[in-house]
Image: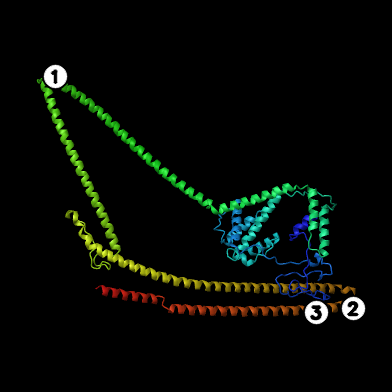
Amino acid sequence: MRRSSSTSRSSCRQSIQPLRVQDTNKIGLHTPQPQDRTGFGKLSVGKHAPGTLERKSSFFGKRTSGPGSLRNSQYGGFGSVEKIKEPRPLHDKAFIQQCIRQLCDFLLTYGYGPTVSMKSLQTPSVKDFLKIFSFVYGFFCHSYELPSSKFEEEIPRIFKELGYPFPLTKSSMYTVGAPHTWPQIVASLVWLIDCFKLYSALKENPPSFDEGQTLGGETEDEIVHNKPFLDYVIKCYDHFMRGGDTFEEFDAEIQSKQKDLFKIDENRINAQEAEEKRLNEEIARREKERESEPDRLVTLRKLKSSLQADSQKYDAYMATLESHSSSITQKSKGITDMLEAAAMETEALKQENTRLGHICDNQKYSVADIQRLNSEREELQQAVNKETKKLEAEQHQLWNEELKYAKGKEAIETQLEDYHKLARKLKLIPISTENSGVIDFEIKFNPDAGQNCLVKYKTQIQTPLIHLTNKTNEEIANATKKKIALEDTLEQVNTMEADRNNSVKMLSEEAQKLEEIVQQKIKEAAEEEEKGVKEMELLEKHKFLLESGVNEGVSEAMKELQEIRCRYQVVTQITSEESRKVVENLQHILELISTHVESVEKYLAEQNDKIDREFDEFMSEDPLATLREIRDSYKMKLDTLNTSDN
């Protein structure tokens, strides 16, 4: 395994430049170091200076850098850990929706078992989150199974071991779907997915720098050194330690060497960059098309339902065709029977004609008499047919007239029925209803009375209906005005209520943040106490070792015991003093928090009292008083107009 590759993986820095040590003269960027470290086992418990960054203390002491001196080496800042500021816009809803879409696409692409969609991933439950995490982490560790208990400790530990740069708290594991927690969780899942994709890409397409390529370097203990790169790092570090901040010439030199060494084609790189740009534009265009077009799954489901409905209709149509075929078969059978009966009847008629021909041959009438009788019979038959046609025409005309009469009567009765239904809804009939005004609006249809049976109702009903319509329109206009005024008042009240709710929400969030700070301080105090206990255990072990060397000499053992007791007293005194300081600091912090909480509660109580007073004042004022005054004035004007008309 290469040394360079191992160090690059273990380092969290994105740049190859050396780590700079901050100026210790600045306030809040370092932890003060104790000056006296001569005491055996002396605890180093210092208070952090106020600031936004936290660092561990250096194992090699402080080194200052000035304009006339060389800069500190990166080993002078060994063990420094800074809180990284969150660069991702977790408060941007568009960014969160993009992360949710990436997570949904990944789960659907790699065959996630349960049904998942954009809607279900907006506020998932803890159970759904645990299933999704187990599925994604299973690509890294195939035999991984999430424990049934203490998952709130297991998941942050896994992210920390994988190198996730931002901490996940235990409390966030209990409220995964909350609006203030879910953005951090979904961003961590997307980071885990990106790690898997990068791992897969490196596994499928390994880098061009294979294990056997020494690049003219030297091999020592099976470790390959890249000499040009090491020379470049040495020059940059030397330039940096001498106060330089720019490395363009070194970058250009190593870049030219790498190009010559690997025979890089500039035209090919430019073509690949153009291709990458084109592919990015294509991806953006496809994303826009995907956002603009409806959900394809919903469309396919609708198509499936429509096809199922068409299939059901086709089955019903086939059933009707089968029933129709059976009925046609029965009709065909009946027609066959009728044909057989007709054939038998034809045979009987032939026999009858033969019998009649025999009778005709043997009768006493002459042929002229028979012809005369036949002609008379034909004339009579023609007269009968003519009269029959006239009768059928008269019956057909009578039938048409009856149909016209029935249709007209049915239309009039339908209109009257609709009119009576509407009149009953409007409380116009019967006469005893409130809107009838002692006027009979009911229309009684009597066809036997003649054509003018409905004319009398026109003068009886039309004028009262017009008057009632005008009156109703005026009432509707007045009610609409009142409704608009009341809606404006309601909107103002809702706006005030929303403002109060926002202020209460902000105060509750501040109280939650303060509670988290208190928990953090308590945790730090517990850690300091645990360190003190461990130091005491070390002292006890050392004391035991000293007592075991009594065989070397009683006098020497007594002296060493006396020295150990003195050191133990010093350590005990320092530990008790520092514990007292920690307790005092915690008490002071708790007092400040309690005071702040009391002030917040007092402020909230005052705000509630103020809101109650304003609400009582608002409710004491009658919002309909002005409307009543306007109504009374309109009534007075209407009365004056009516009296003037009379």
Q: Which residue is mark 1?
A: 361
Disc 3 crowd, CA 10 A, few/some/many (<14, 14-19, 20+): some
Kind of residue at badge 2: Ser
Mark 2 and mark 1 residues within 8 Å of each other at the beta carbon? no
Residue drawn at x 25%, y 27% as measured from the top left: 343
Residue 641 image position (x, y, % from top left):
29, 73
Tell me: 490 left or right of 528.
left
Residue 569 image position (x, y, % from top left):
80, 80
Is residue 99 visible to the viewer in this orientation of the structure? Answer: yes
Mark 1 and mark 3 residues within 8 Å of each other at the beta carbon? no
Residue drawn at x 27%, y 73% as measured from the top left: 642
Residue drawn at x 83%, y 77% as measured from the top left: 564
Residue drawn at x 38%, y 68% as measured from the top left: 480
Q: Which residue is mark 3?
A: 570
Q: Earlier in the sequence, mark 3 or mark 2?
A: 2
Q: CA distance from mark 1 to mark 3?
A: 166 Å
Kind of residue at badge 1: Asp
Disc 1 crowd, CA 10 A, few/some/many (<14, 14-19, 20+): few
Quadrant location of the C terminus in the rendered image = bottom left
Q: Earlier in the sequence, mark 2 or mark 1?
A: 1
Nearer to us of marks 2 and 1 is 1
The circle on residue 555 is 2
Nearer to us of marks 3 and 2 is 3
Q: Is residue 299 above or below residue 513?
A: above
Q: Nearer the viewer, residue 365 or 359?
A: 365
Residue 182 image position (x, y, % from top left):
60, 63
Q: CA distance from mark 3 to mark 2?
A: 23 Å
Tell me: 332 left or right of 149.
left
Nearer to us of marks 1 and 3 is 1
Q: Quadrant of residue 74?
A: bottom right
